[in-house]
Amino acid sequence: MLDTMLASGGDERLLVDPRTGRNRYGVPPGSAAGEIWFSSSVAAAASPRGLASAARALDRTIRATDSLSLPGMFDHIREGVVGLFAPQGAEIALAGSGPEAEFILLAAAASLLSNPMTSLVIAPGESDEEFALAANGQHFIQFPPFGAELTRGGKAEGFARDRRSAAIELRDRYGVPLEPAQVDCAVEKHVARALAQGRDVLLHLVDCSQTGRSGPSRACAAKLAAAHPGRVLVAVDIRQLRCQREQIAADLEAGFIVLLSGSHFAGGPPFSGAILFPPAVVEKLGPIPLPAGLAACSAALDWSPRLRDKIEGDFSALANLGLGLRWQCALAELEAYFALDIDTRQRIGARFALELHAHLDASPHLRLLDCDWRESSNARRIFPIVTFDDRGRAFSAEKLHRALAEPHARRGRRSRDERPIHLGAPVAIGPMQALRLSLSAPQVNSVADRLREGMSFDAAFHPLSNDLAETFGRWNELAARDA
């Protein structure tokens, strides 16, 4: 029953293929023991800790005695997320996915900004196509959980028709990262142009893209918001959750809206998102008309009571139980992760980066992008890697991605014991495509659990070392065979 409920309350992206038992992201709704998951930049299977927490929550909502009501369950989830990241007075709305959170953001922005709006989106090529559609006020799905069939790509009813969107890139056309000052300058020019045209601006700031980039700088965003109060609204995309929670609290204190996800670093199943509104924004929020496109995928209990009271319109559903259970999975890992002291978290992350670099140094066909980035490699948690042949030509990332995840389907299989290996799906970097290998909270927590059992650090880290060794061993084998 739990597996069925975890796959509920989504759209066609979450549907389980009966032939494979997996959704569009290659993730099963329940346990995936015996597989290697370095794919948290996109989606990974739920952890045993997360599944156990979701099972307890589901049991409490359906038992005749000692039950937890649906409103009580969602109160607990919202309070848990806010308690981890937000200052007092912040409010939250849960969202099935990043694009749905973007719809919530657009609806709220319409309440906060008076003039026609221009939305500045950062590095759309390093996000999913659905998010880009949502940012432009277009339907990003065909089959919403609570509404009739939609036309994907069509204009969503209820959003202003005079809104515009513009893209700011973090890389040039060859995939080379732009300097932070270049990104800030491009943002400032776009904002100045929009304001001069009598338009207000919704500025997206990406804390960590799918290849680990960020921009514009928080200083740039804060300067623009302070210089144009009531006309420039800043939203920080922290869906990858690769920063410290103190940074999220600081963003909210600065008056920035924050988009979160429990489906990436947090290790929850796909489709567990949220949007946090800082106290300063909550005070300014007026009535929020509920667009039909948003009502088709959002339920009443996703919203905190204070935000729910501001909604004008009727929700199609009271609760999205599947979303709640997916957030239960994510919260279990996040609470465990942030209960660790920062030295332990950093030590595990540094060891992961050290071993990954050692494997790359011994891999003639693999190259890590952005090695000279300003952020130290020990602080990185997403590693975009391009595979080359002997002539320096980039391999097909799709082919490699599939061969690693489906070892039974590839030619020349060595052993029946090969485990499926999941990496972040291919992302275009200029003319190349990279696969992304990422560290997640469940992996850090597993090492910490073994440390608490009395193991030495080397012994506690050993299973993760084995996963890295097997991943790079198979990856190199595939590259050498086809070189």
Image (spheres, rainbow, N blue to C red):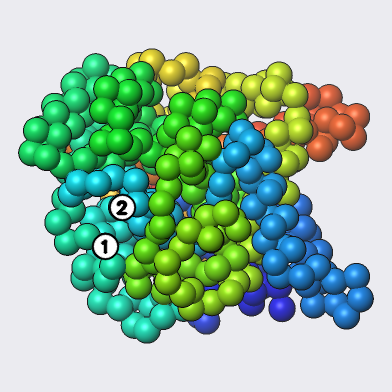
Query: Amino acid type of disc 1?
Result: Phe
Q: Quadrant of residue 366?
A: top left
For marks 1 and 2 on the same chain, the one whose residue lies earlier in the sequence = 2
Give the residue at x 71% y 19%. 343
Give the residue at x 72% y 55%. 76
Q: Which residue is mark 2?
A: 110
Towards the viewer: 42 or 472: 42
Towards the viewer: 399 or 347: 347
Q: Which residue is mark 1?
A: 159
> What kind of element bears circle 1?
loop
Residue 441: % across, % down: 64, 40
For the residues bearing labels 1 and 2, Cβ distance under 8 angstroms: yes
Residue 139 vs residue 66: left or right? left
* Quadrant housing the C terminus: top left
Residue 97 vs residue 345: left or right? left
Residue 8: % across, % down: 57, 74
Query: Can you see residue 391?
Result: no
Give the residue at x 34% y 67%. 291
Q: Quadrant of residue 444?
A: top right
Say above or below: 361 vs 306: above
Say above or below: 341 vs 62: above
Q: Residues within 10 Å of mark 2 (few under 14, many from 20)?
A: many
State how far apart marks 1 and 2 are (Cα): 8 Å
Give the residue at x 60% y 21%. 350
Residue 200 vs residue 5: left or right? left
Towards the viewer: 418 or 87: 87
> What kind of element bears circle 2?
helix
